[in-house]
Amino acid sequence: MEDALLDDGDTSSMLERAWDDMYNDEDPEIKQFAVDLAVYAFITSGDQSSGGSFFKFVPNTIRKGLTINRGGKKLNYSDFIYNTRK
């Protein structure tokens, strides 16, 4: 039942807008929280839509600037998608 609620189009749009609102907030701590949450979602799901994944709700405004430091190497979302789709 919970997954059905999260897959509802209106709910998905609402979550994306709320996340985008956090990202565009004037308070730098709230903006950083939105980014940190996106990084967490990306690391835990790898952009896979599964039962507990919530990366699908990360707005594109955050995705396109998302950079993760992994082992001293920077990995951005676009590179990740490009390399996994080859």
Image: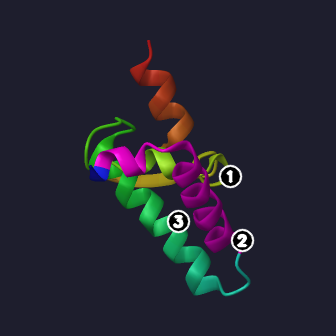
Residue 10 falls inside the magenta stretch: yes
Q: Viewer-proximal residue, 4 or 59?
A: 4
Whichever of callouts 1 and 2 sits on the residue coming sooner in the sequence is: 2
Q: Secondary structure at mark 2?
A: loop
Measure the C-alpha gap from mark 3 to mark 2. Answer: 11 Å
Instruction: Residue type at mark 2: give it.
Output: Asn
The structure's colour scheme is rainbow
| Res. 50 image quadrant | top left
Name the residue beneath numbered marker 2: 24
* Kind of residue at disc 1: Thr
Q: Quadrant of residue 32?
A: bottom right
> What span is colored magenta in the figure?
3-24
Quadrant of the image containing the C terminus: top left
Q: Which residue is mark 3?
A: 35
Give the residue at x 43% y 65%: 37
Question: Which residue was labeled with disc 1?
Answer: 61
- Indicate left or right for 53 with 11 as reference: left
Residue in the picture at 51% in, 32% down: 79
- Check disc 3: other Cα within 10 Å, few if <14, some if 14-19, many if 20+: many
Residue drawn at (45%, 33%) of the image: 80
